[in-house]
Image (tube, helix red, strand yellow):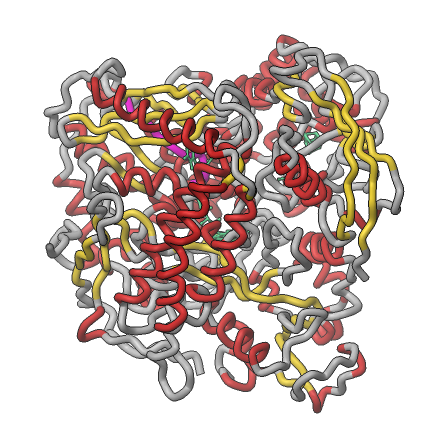
Amino acid sequence: MSRTINLTLLVWRQGKQSPKGSFETFQARDIDTDSSFLEMLDTVNEKISLNGGEPIAFDHDCREGICGACGAMVNGRAHGHEKGTTLCQLHMRHFNDGDTVVIEPWRARAFKVIKDLVVDRSALDKIMAAGGYISVNTGGAQDANSLPVPADDAEKAMDAAQCIGCGACVAACPNASAMLFVSAKISHLALLPQGRPEAARRALAMVREMDACGFGNCGNERECEAECPKEISIINIARLNREFIKSSLI
Amino acid sequence: MELNGNVPDGPVNEKWDRRKSELKLVNPANKRKFTIIVVGTGLAGGSASASLAELGYNVKTFCIQDSPRRAHSIAAQGGINAAKNYPNDGDSVWRLFYDTVKGGDFRAREGNVYRLAQVSNAIIDHCVAQGVPFAREYGGLLANRSFGGAQVSRTFYARGQTGQQLLLGCYSALMRQVAAKKVTLFPRREMLELVMVDGKARGIVARNLITGEIESHEAHAVVLATGGYGNVFYLSTNAMASNVTAAWRCHKKGAFFANPCFTQIHPTCIPVHGDSQSKLTLMSESLRNDGRVWVPKNKGDKRAPSDIPESERDYYLERKYPSFGNLVPRDVASRNAKAVCDEGRGVGATGLAVYLDFADAIKRDGKDTIAKKYGNLFAMYEKITAQDPYQVPMMIYPAIHYTMGGLWVDYNLMSTVDGLFVIGEANFSDHGANRLGASALMQGLADGYFVLPYTIGGYLGQGGLGEVSTGHQAFVDAAKQARDQTDRLLSIRGKRTVDDFHRELGKLMWDNCGMGRTDEGLAAAKERIPQIRAEFWESVRVPGEGLDLNASLEKAGRVADFLEFAELMVDDALARRESCGGHFNEAFQTPENEALRDDENFCHVAAWEYKGENAPEERHQEPLTFENVKLSQRSYK
Ligand SMILES: Cc1cc2nc3c(=O)[nH]c(=O)nc-3n(C[C@H](O)[C@H](O)[C@H](O)COP(=O)(O)OP(=O)(O)OC[C@H]3O[C@@H](n4cnc5c(N)ncnc54)[C@H](O)[C@@H]3O)c2cc1C
Ligand code: SF4
Ligand code: FES
């Protein structure tokens, strides 16, 4: 049953007015526990606006856990403490009346803070541009069923393809590595016969670009897997490593 | 004025080939000399950008999100149609065409719809080649399911995340062209004005959403792929940034707006929880394949669903529509849900919900089978409502989901402004008054991969497009217009937030221009909208600055446009003296409460022309002729 709760928020504020950034405290009053974390922030922002302040900036769009736009550290956890959940799908029923909640942006060398909780994740697009595709032009594809894919491979590819590119794995990693993200894309494509011809080149190009963008190395800490809202498995990192080794042998 | 859809002559199955052979070609060396702006990176804009770049054009691609991969298309769950007939159940291009025309309640152009069905198979082939991980059977071939009222299994899907996987396919193709330097990406940009030079679309003005600067971009043609306007209702299943702004600003520059009152209500959404609700979540319609819809037979029955015996349940869709049952089209399912709730038989705390029950399916197929089909949807439902649908029936209620109306385009997907093409949900073209499930993804990709790349070549190949630069007076004026509006919004510093206005408008539209429309309700909305608009411009509060990231300012601009556009929707609903598909005026219904069309007087597209501020818009007509599918009353009994 829905209730209302009161919270104290400690929110990271950074931007034109405070280039270095600092925490600011807000009271979140009468929050409906059926609402989502972002709806809670909406409520707080309405108050801030009416009181003459500047609302807390955060990224969001689909609000159903699929676009990967939202995300923040909540009490030190990427997307909050609920497993397999994006921030927009974290509901306030998982908080208690009187809680203090600390909200910070993703922190990583490759993700510059733009404003408050909004960070620049364009490095992930750059990694994709480096090789996250199968080189096929529109037109001329053969009949889709002429290339059977074992159901099991298709399922595994789909498991990896679920990555929403939110960047939580990077934020959760002590080395700010993007390995889980990269491995998810590489696995998705390498597991499918269509993706095999370019698998080696793809792995090499994407890993190189990841390094060039300033992401750290994978130290096998497994924090990424624990925080990933789509529960992408680190088995994918092992698969990436295999593809990468193959590529360096060529 | 009577509009001409520019559909080629000849038998319906030869029209597209005929057009392709008539269209002028641009030779490869010349393609390099053309720049095309694509606004939007959903399935339509993403596929168009990639395909145009592959052909050799220079493409500039814009989107609001920080990455093109996050466009609203990503949220589509259920699937994409194609006429492959892999299950051998009698499907064909003709049947997909027929179903789409009929499902759209005979308010779409036959020629367009036939082409859509024709290219549908190539979409699946291409997506598989790109690595889209569609569901497969054990033998490794592609799996299909029936969806949203179709009696054949023609829907391809990727778990409950078909839109995401298709969009990642487009996006990867797009990023490949970014790497090849054929596409320049402009994320976190919002198009605010269309720029016309010598009567032709030659560029846009956009706001950089990080710095707040107004930027100008020139091109030889502009493609709008900016999605639908469902957020005029405030609560909808659309992503938060979905808007009418780009389309509306083009409308004000001369692009006719077609059938704005054709909006689709999706029958299976999670009911509203309370005042802080910011958007609605769809539960894929594929759930209706196995879930049974019911409400208590008696009014005000507040017992838990498990305490209501079989004999006191009303499976109203199965009762009223024995041959389609729970799989009736969306508009029919939605209106019936509203009707039982209006009778006081709705369930849940608000009484605005009906049950979608999987108990029988679980008994029949086992929990594992159901989990395999719908596991992630069930998990999503539980996350949002804290109820376990394996144990208790889901509660669902209709919500705004899709907009069939959009900018008017001819067969070549060009609007009434030369050089302005409109694709995907942003145009009006293929779904008539009601879209079938799994057909929006098909249309977006058909437009972007397989139609626009040809037809835009025909336009560019005609010549007559001299060079223009952003120094041209038209760009200067458009940029000033955009800046003036921003300054005006920021200077009001009133007492009500943007969301507050948006909520008020949304409720007004939902109550009066939503599922069941009446002349009185529409008239009341028509009176109220200008008042809300005036209040908005007097007392809205937009905090922050113009030259900064400012989400409130972005929203304010979008709501300002919704406040103008809403009135046109109401005008369109009032002018259409019939019911059809998603437009249901209670004055026009059959004795069985189905939509009653007036084919004699309204078998046409209504396309509205902007006539200046505060002047009534002019309604033009494009007559629709049906040579292949006989006009008939839809019946799903
Ligand atoms: C929850 C949900 C589930 C759905 N499921 C299905 C399904 O299973 N099957 C099906 O066929 N259909 C489904 N649909 C419908 C379908 O997803 C959409 O109709 C389709 O994806 C629209 O694609 P689009 O490319 O036209 O636009 P969108 O995907 O909406 O993309 C719009 C793009 O335009 C950009 N944009 C908008 N305005 C501006 C501006 N002013 N300046 C710059 N950029 C701008 C946005 O940033 C975005 O990139 C579903 C819809 C919803 C809401
Ligand atoms: S791997 Fe997981 S955490 Fe990382 S970007 Fe993808 S979805 Fe987000
Ligand atoms: S807003 Fe899209 S994943 Fe959270």
Relative to B189, is B290 above or below? below
At 52% from the left and 38% from the top, the residue drawn is: B494
Where residue B277 sits: x, y (%)? 64, 52
B40 is within the stretch colored magenta: yes
Quarter of the image with the N terminus of chain A in it: bottom right
Where residue B415 sits: x, y (%)? 23, 43
Range of magenta residues? B35-43
Q: Is residue B213 left or right of residue A180?
A: left
- Observer-nearest residue: B124 or B304? B304
- Observer-nearest residue: B366 or B396? B396
At 76% from the left and 84% from the top, the residue drawn is: B308
- Observer-nearest residue: A166 or B116? A166
Work out whether residue B194 can be spotted: yes
Relative to B28, is B222 above or below? below
Where residue B42 sits, quadrant-wise, is top left
Relative to A9, is A18 above or below? above
At 18% from the left and 72% from the top, the residue drawn is: B601
Work out whether residue A242 can be spotted: no
- Observer-nearest residue: B246 or B459? B246
Quarter of the image with the C terminus of chain A in it: top right
Where residue B14 sits: x, y (%)? 18, 53
B58 is within the stretch colored magenta: no
Q: How many numbered markers are drawn?
A: 0
Where residue B110 sits: x, y (%)? 24, 60
Relative to B491, is A202 above or below? above
